[in-house]
Image: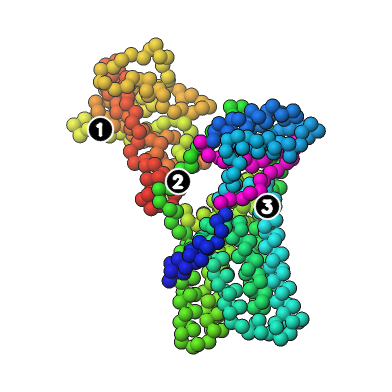
Amino acid sequence: MIAQAGTVLAAIASRLPISPGRRQRRRWVGNGRAHIEVRGIHRPENHQAAGGLEAALAEVAGVQWAEVNTVAGRVVVAFDGDQVGVDEICDVIEGVEDAHDLSDERFPHDRPDHPADSEPIQRQLYAIGADLGGLGLGLAGQLVFGQFGRLARSNPLIGEAASLLSLVESTPLLRRPIEGRLGRAATDLSLAAGNAVAQGLAAGPLGLVVDIAQRGLLLDELRARRDLWQQREPMLSGQPAASGLPAARAGAERPVPLPPGPVETYSSKAAAGALAGAAAALAATRDPHLMVAATATANPKPARLGREGFAARVDRDLARSGVLAMDTEALRRLDRIDTVVLDTRLLTSGRMVVGSVWIPPDRQADAEAAVLAAHALLNQPAAPPAATRPHDHGSQSAESANRLPRSPTTAPAPAPAPTRDPAPAGAGIPAIPRARKSTNGLVPAGTPSGGAAIAAHPSAQGAVPSSATRRPAQGSRPVSARQSAGPKV
């Protein structure tokens, strides 16, 4: 049923005008720098436009330096306000956009809000104003309009409209078609205003009070992010990058859509139950008031507000602790995570240690010698290239073993050469990264992607193998392969 309702809503939304993006250019000015949006600069095919923009701005009198940030879709310009103004800089940007056929583009709806933007804060203030207006409308209907107010409150169509608007606002499957036409920001503000008017006419102040409280949490989050941005901007953008920022790259798309999380799953089921309950109540009782009650009872709004409130508080506390989340939507997806992929370089010290030693069945008597040889192989000091000599087994030279990651701070002392027999030929020595003390509990899950297998060969000069072949550890699959298999990586 919810899928059919989504199809109907999508058909209605298809009649709405398509909004390809925002027209208004966002910018932030402070600390002698301006962060200004640029059309199309985030796409890899426009790298020449990015270079041309930096060169054009560098020629403007009063501009000290300019650097394009393709991830944020902005250019950072350090300038002297006494010689050049922000409007003149924007004129240069528009000229470069026009020269590269970008002037007709819109700024994308799906770009994360920059922490310096004032528009998201204004949007929340407008929504709170609409809710306050709805409260005033409901109060006026009770005290001023008299008979009109009583008719509005007794009309089940108004109550049903308020319930349906709230249902669409809280159900991702119903809300998505409208966002696809209008964009997320316009959809959020439109539904907030419509919901405020409908609940005001239906004299439902409790829902409006809850909305105001939730908008207050979001407003607190946005202000904390903006305050932290203003504090950290000199550190983040005070100087141009020494080697320049990396060029734009095509974003890696998931091979399959992100599976729904618990809130999405519950919202879809609750919305289907609300619509089915309303239809059953109307068919059984012919009472439109019970139909409205059935729709409102199964509204999944609490689930959405709970997640929004949690994410808003987490983001606010992160900002107050000095951590700036550039894309806050990532915090709204925390409830979907069931798999975490860790880079073992963050968890290990850089040295390789012996995990275990496999001995052929016919050479078990030499197991102790193989273990000693394995440890000596990983702890021997790096030899100069001139000392490297070829070997007889068709594998890499001893220099391969010396290239294994080592600690950046301390060089391990070479282990004493064992005095026992050489390691048996074909001994398998799985080498694993040595864990940092602070991450011992996480390493078992991350070790397979950073280990190596070393095939040791006996040396004619002694027990320490003179050659080793380092092979990537088996079992590490790309993130995209894990996503295709189903985990919400």
Say left or right for 142 vs 404: right
Dot 2: element? loop
Marks 1 and 3, Cα distance to the nearest angstrom? 66 Å
Of 249 and 483, nearer the camera is 249
**Eyeballing the image, is 460 above or below 207?**
above
Cα–Cα span, label 2 and label 1: 44 Å
Number of residues whose C-alpha sits closer than 10 Å to that of mark 1, classed few (under 14), some (14–19) or many (20 or more): many
Tell me the residue that label 2 is attached to.
253
* Segment tinted magenta in the rendering: 20-45
Q: Is residue 176 magenta?
A: no
Dot 3 crowding, Cα within 10 Å, few <14, some 14–19, many 20+ = few
Q: Quadrant of residue 158?
A: bottom right
Q: Quadrant of residue 127?
A: bottom right
The residue at which mark 1 appears reads as 359
Residue 73 x, y percent position in the rendering: 59, 41
- 64 versus 210 height, above or below: above
Rendered image quadrant of residue 417: top left
Label 1 or label 3, whichever comes before in sequence order = 3
The residue lying at 63 percent from left, 46 percent from top is 114
SS category of the residue bearing label 3: helix
Q: CA distance from mark 2 to mark 3?
A: 28 Å
Nearer to us in this view, 408 or 97: 97
Q: In percent of the image, x 79 and y 31: which residue is there?
A: 83
Q: Residue at x 42, y 14 (%)?
A: 384
Q: Residue 151 placed where, x, y %?
A: 66, 84
Circle 3 residue: 119
Residue 187 percent across, percent down from the top left: 59, 60
Q: Amino acid at mark 2?
A: Glu
User: Which of the two residues, 445 or 63, is positioned nearer the viewer here?
Assistant: 63
- Tag 3: residue type? Glu
Mark 1: which amino acid?
Ile
